[in-house]
Image: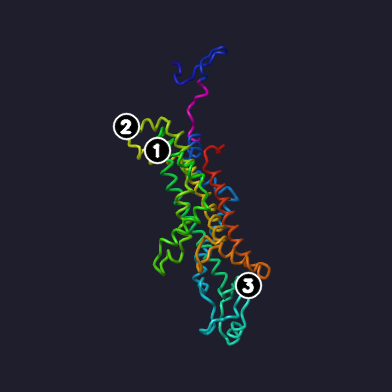
Amino acid sequence: MADNNKLPKKNLLSTQVNLSRFEPATEEEKRQQDVMSESVTFFKDGMRKLFKNPLAVASIIVLFCIIVTIIVAPMIVPYSYEEMLSVNGKRDKGAKNLAPFEYSKAEQKYIADGNYRFPHIFGTDEQCRDYFIRVIYGTRVSLIIGFFASIIVLVIGMIYGSISGYIGGKVDLIMMRIVDIIYSLPDMLVIILLSVVLNEVIHFPSGSFLAKVGTNMVSLFLVFGMLYWVTMARLIRGQILSIKENEYILAARSIGAKPGRIIRKHILPNCISVIIISTALQIPSAIFTESYLSFVGLGVRAPMPSLGSLANSAREGLQSYPYKLVFPALVICLIVLSLNLLGDGLRDAFDPKLKR
């Protein structure tokens, strides 16, 4: 009796498919295939690649250390950012412009009497305020401004770019011409004009958070909301113009899905790499913008510090006290460099065009 399971032999000159190449897989090969075909999400795959990038990992560690420091340090250091040093209830006028870990004469006498005095890690400023805690609060302000500004840019740019790219036609043409007009506006001039107008028109309640921040910072946030979202909008629009022609978008339209749902459920998830990368690179840009605006006197209002305003104050005594400029400048460099390297790492990990 002939064996029905035996595969027929392939003739030498035949065009027939060689069936011996399609033998059933063994149990061991099946188990190997299960391991090889592990299912991972886009986000998980991107994070796995990100943590293989040593520069990105180093940037995450540096940022984590900075964030932990600015959270924990005010709980440990007994000074506030606006407190002028005093000993036994009396203002210590001799604690002006102290070097790092240096004590004034009154503090030395206080310590000699058997009392404890927390050291001035970065010294003091010209108004007898602890410089370390001012740098800590300045870092807080700069980071908060950077993150909030990037969120403003993300929300406005994503909504505007999604509408423009999905609708297309004349609506897209008009919306993009508006973007071109906004590109031509000088941001520095707009910030100065808004600061002057807000100073004259708006008066915040004394003691409130907005009063401490000042009209300069409010105008800075307004400028981020008015001007800095255009790059994000253009990037998302470009992605949507290519994605909306795919078959699954046509299928969603054919079953009656509304444009808002199509954008939210089908288009924006496929733009997630561009959104993550652009947002990550926007944060250092916003921090740097706030720093140089504070450096020229258009940033946070005194006595609340920012890294830029601290660098501006240190410029006056640069020859006598150069370390006052080094500390805020070093923190700015660390934050901006770390965020830029992290943004590059996110681009390498999440950009589909860079996948091998």
Residue lying furthest top in this view?
13
Disc 3 from disc 1: Cα separation: 56 Å
232 over 171 or under it: above or below: below
- The residue beneath circle 1 is 266
The location of residue 194, given as percent across then percent down, is 46, 56
Residue lying furthest left: 256
Residue 96's disc is none
Residue 346 image offset from top left, x and y in percent: 53, 46
Is residue 16 visible from the viewing direction of this image? Answer: yes
Label 1 crowd bin: few (<14), some (14–19), many (20+), radius 10 Å: some
Residue 310 lies within the magenta run: no
Which residue type does callout 2 highlight? Ile
**What span is in magenta?**
19-28
Query: Is residue 356 placed above or below 83 in the rendered structure?
Result: above
Position in image of residue 185 (x %, y %): 50, 47
Q: Which of the 4 image quadrants contains residue 97?
A: bottom right
Between marks 3 and 2 in the image, the one whose residue lies nearer the viewer:
3
The residue closer to the viewer here, 25 or 237, is 237
**Which residue is identified by label 3?**
100
Q: Earlier in the sequence, mark 3 or mark 2?
A: 3
Q: Quadrant of residue 94?
A: bottom right
The residue tagged 2 is 255
